[in-house]
Image (cartoon, rainbow, N blue to C red):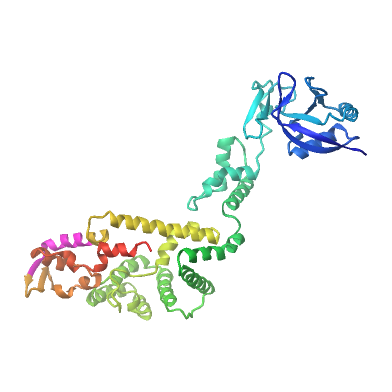
Amino acid sequence: MENIPILLQHSGEWDDNNNFINFHVDAILIKTYWKFEQLLREIAKQLQKDSKTIVIQYAIAQGYPPITICSDMSVSVYMELKKSSAGMTTLPLMYTLECVDERCTGRLKASSLRASNLFKVTDFNYVHSCLTDKRFCSQKQVVSAFVAAVVQDKLVDPKIIYTPTDIQRDIQKAYGMDLSYMQAWRSKEKAMQLLRGKPSESYKKMPTYLYMLEYANPGSDKFYTSHMQLLIRKMMHRGSGSSGSSEKPMKKERECALYQTCMMTNFRKSQKQIKEVYFMLARAYTVEEFNRHMAELEAIDSRVKTYLMDIGYDKWSRAHSKANRIMTMTSNIAESVNATNKHARDLPVVNLLDFMTTLIQKWNYTNRKDVVESFMKIGVMYEKILSDNTILSQTMTVLPSTEFLHLVIDGQTRNTVRLHEKNCTCGRFQLDDIPCPHAMAIIQKFHMDSYKYCSDYYNIDYLLKTMRYQ
């Protein structure tokens, strides 16, 4: 039961003088009674190589041709030589790749160049004497780890939809390998785990993430915490179907959502007609215009008016709003963000926060760049409104009363404009905080500065302040 220490010289090559060079060294303990298969299996286990690729050879003296160990008898001979010569402690090895057909002459021999990742091919016969179907038809196998490594780059962007069917097609096209749907699905799941990790691990990173966020941007931690708590409460509220809430902003959003839901269910038959009139109703600038559209809506379905009255006109009507919203019908940015991040919602929480951070940074950079490079005095959107109102004012007649009080005739309608108060009977001037077509008719007639009557918040300088770096 004696153990014999053996030094393994492997991944080298024999030179012209029968010396084994450019090798690596490892070591094992072998039993004197081992047979060839046991020796081969132990060497393969130690070197973490396939036993089929290992050729065992040794030299009894310097310059002697190597002797190959390939049977139980040759192992026994080596053992006896080892016992009689204590200095013979090496088993030089080299690797050979052979064709699956034992009768084929195709093969490749290679060895690594010292400790580098480069390999030197010492013998290569690329001409196969076997049949093609022997090599290609039954030998191709693929594992999920390999496929996951191949396809993971296509799953980095959450907006890209890459299905198991796509994986089957791409692997077949690139490697000629046929995957089952389940193999492709498992490969995709493994690739997703390689990229994103496990959700539980992501939640463990949250304290560190919030700490670094607070460190880089003081005050951000409280902001994130409060907004995440509000988001969770909203999700729980919507999921439970509860009708009560202690959050006033949530109540307002709920009523708006309830309106949209009711329009799609209770008034399904006339939904298209109602939708068109409703938006005209919501965007009406004066109460008179509002009442006119309400009469149209009531003629379509009288139940709608009662429903909208119960909600409260001030919740959704521009004309009845208790505050000047200045062209902003809603401040619920969550809806805009939800439309953008729907593809990223399956990401782990830290990855999702990184996605949102990158998204906001991109928006801020793009908007700031557009403003900085602009040659206009006000924002692009407001410049277009001024331009459109100027075109509409071309056919209007201006009758001055005082320096700041004018009557503007537009066909059959008459509107009174008070420039110094930024007010017009059409309602647009004071609500949009930008000259309406009637005001523009006066400004054009007397060659006045239209930008003077625009809100300061439309100014380029103010737009830059909203996106300034802290």
**Which percent across, then down, holds residue 100?**
72, 28
Residue 384 versus residue 413: which sits nearer the camera? 384
Task: Look at the picture and state if 280 lies above or below 83.
Answer: below
The reply, left or right, for residue 404 in relation to residue 8 is left
Residue placed most toward the observer, 396 or 71: 71
Residue under the point 83% across and 34% down? 39
Rendered image quadrant of residue 79: top right
The answer to whether residue 424 is visible is no
Against 132, is 299 above or below? below
Q: Is residue 87 left or right of residue 317?
A: right
Residue 19 pos. (x, y %)? 74, 23
Q: Is residue 226 above or below residue 467?
A: below
Q: Position of residue 175 (x, y in %)?
A: 59, 35
> Which one is in front, 123 or 177?
123
Please state, as top left, top right, bottom left or bottom right, where the N terminus lies in the image. Answer: top right
Q: Is residue 334 left or right of residue 155?
A: left
Residue 390 highlighted magenta (yes or no): yes
Q: Is residue 209 left or right of residue 317?
A: right
Quadrant in which residue 71 is drawn: top right
Q: Is residue 178 magenta?
A: no
Quarter-wise, where is residue 29 in the image?
A: top right
Q: Residue furthest front?
A: 87
Depth check, front residue: 419 or 23: 23
Which residues lie in the magenta part?
Answer: 385-398
Quarter holding the C terminus? Answer: bottom left
User: Residue 263 appears at what percent x and percent y?
Assistant: 40, 70
At 57% from the left and 42% from the top, the residue drawn is: 150
